[in-house]
Image (cartoon, rainbow, N blue to C red):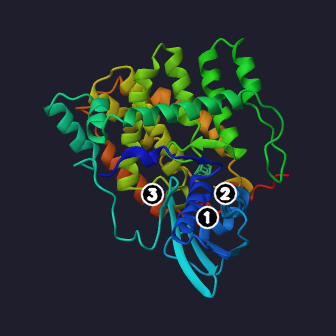
Amino acid sequence: MESIRDIFITGYGPSSSHTIAPGKAVEYLLRKYPHIDRAEVTLFGSLALTGKGHGTDDIIRKVFGDIPCEVKTNLDEVKDHINTMEFTLFIGEKTVRETIVSIGGGSILTEEGKGKKNEDVYPFHTLHDILRHCIDNKVDLGDYVIEKEGKDILPYMEEVLRVMDNNVREGLQKEGYLPASFKIKRRAKAIYEESKSKEESAEYEVMATSIAVAEENAAGAIVSTAPTCGSCGVIPGVICYLRKRGIDDRKIVKGLCVAGLIGKIIKTNATVSGAVGGCQAEIGSATSMASAMISYCFDKPIKTVAQAAEIALEHSLGLTCDPVGGYVLIPCIERNAIYAVKAINCARLSAFTNPDESKVHFDEIVETMYQTGLDMNQGYKETSTKGMSKLNIC
Ligand code: SF4
């Protein structure tokens, strides 16, 4: 299995697959062809259906900079992957065509990258095998990640934490409306201020924190995927909880390594893309990562950490992606807050579950989530053509 670093990618929100990946695709083309005169881009599938609300066209033009660029959509043709982009580049007398796919969580697949793999960092790709190795060799799960990734994974995660903290700080200060064709107000600041007078203040604070980050993402700020932009508020919410419970940042950084490992196993064996697997693949994966992180930070046994990840993913199965108007606003923002609290409860529940007697294991539930996602009607996978997206909101 490859490095966990692509689980936490920093870039412009609101969508890893619809803004970060298209931005990366243009950067790749600018590197490969430094003398482009003009570009035409055609978006297919989910990118065509929800690209406008997600700001795909804006980010493509922004990264092309001074190079004139026309962005079109094609809803008639069905490509092998739901998030396909076709670029036509005019370079002097030459015309070059490139197809690039946004494969989820901000990652792209280029034509020259097809069939090639990055170097494997881990000899295993299931949690079962990783646990067996760690138990046999008495290795802590966070230390296992550091051993395989190298010590520079720690400054990498410290930077991820800094980006998340910055989003929390900014998001908790701002008021007013978020950018969309319908009016939706920011609520993080109000919830945070209200939390101080509430008996269950910690839970309110967790929700305010998650909403602050999700609102910053919806506004197009620079965020860190975790594992996607749409689900980027879940982990910051649980970090707020961990700090309130006295966990220091050194441990939180190692907890991010464990969360990244869980996310990477899901991305390798299934998907973290809402367009491929529905929201269970995005928010479900984020909740699974967050729950394992909590369990790890509280020094629970390694099998309990795995159980926390399993419970959280199990109880996210079937979650659909039907964002209203194609914006990462409804249901996405509230969903981050609700699932951050859920991650805490899943970690609590795992502590009362004997992993040796458990009937369901993490790797099985990853496979189940993937199959459920493949079976899910495409209208519920980031196309804004069914479900909540049909609500008449103005
Ligand atoms: S509904 Fe879930 S998967 Fe879909 S855009 Fe929102 S957060 Fe992402």
* Alpha carbon distance from label 1 to label 2: 8 Å
**According to the image, label 3 marks what residue?**
372
Count of marks, rendered view: 3
Three-letter code for the amino acid on which mark 1 is drawn:
Gly
Q: Position of residue 236 (x, y in %)?
A: 56, 31
Whether tag 2 and tag 3 are in contact, CB under 8 A, the answer is: no
* Alpha carbon distance from label 2 to label 3: 17 Å
Helix, strand or loop at label 1? It is helix
Q: Position of residue 289 (x, y in %)?
A: 43, 38
Dot 2 alpha-carbon crowd within 10 angstroms: few under 14, some 14 to 19, many 20 or more: some
Three-letter code for the amino acid on which mark 3 is drawn:
Thr
Q: Quadrant of residue 111?
A: bottom left
Helix, strand or loop at label 3? It is helix
Q: Is mark 1 within 8 Å of ligand 1?
A: no
User: Is 22 left or right of 260, judged from the image as shown?
Assistant: right
- Residue 111 vertical placement versus 14 (above, below): below
Q: Position of residue 114 (x, y in %)?
A: 39, 71
Looking at marks 3 and 1 on the same chain, the residue that comes earlier in the sequence is marked by: 3
Q: Position of residue 324 (x, y in %)?
A: 72, 54
**According to the image, label 2 marks what residue?**
387
Three-letter code for the amino acid on which mark 2 is drawn:
Gly
Whether tag 1 and tag 2 are in contact, CB under 8 A, the answer is: yes
* Alpha carbon distance from label 3 to label 1: 14 Å
Q: Is mark 2 within 8 Å of ligand 1?
A: no
**According to the image, label 1 marks what residue?**
379
Q: Does residue 384 appear anywhere in the picture? A: no
Who is closer to the viewer here, 163 or 331? Answer: 163
Give the residue drawn at x 38%, y 37%. Answer: 153
User: Is 274 left or right of 212, judged from the image as shown?
Assistant: left
Helix, strand or loop at label 2? It is helix
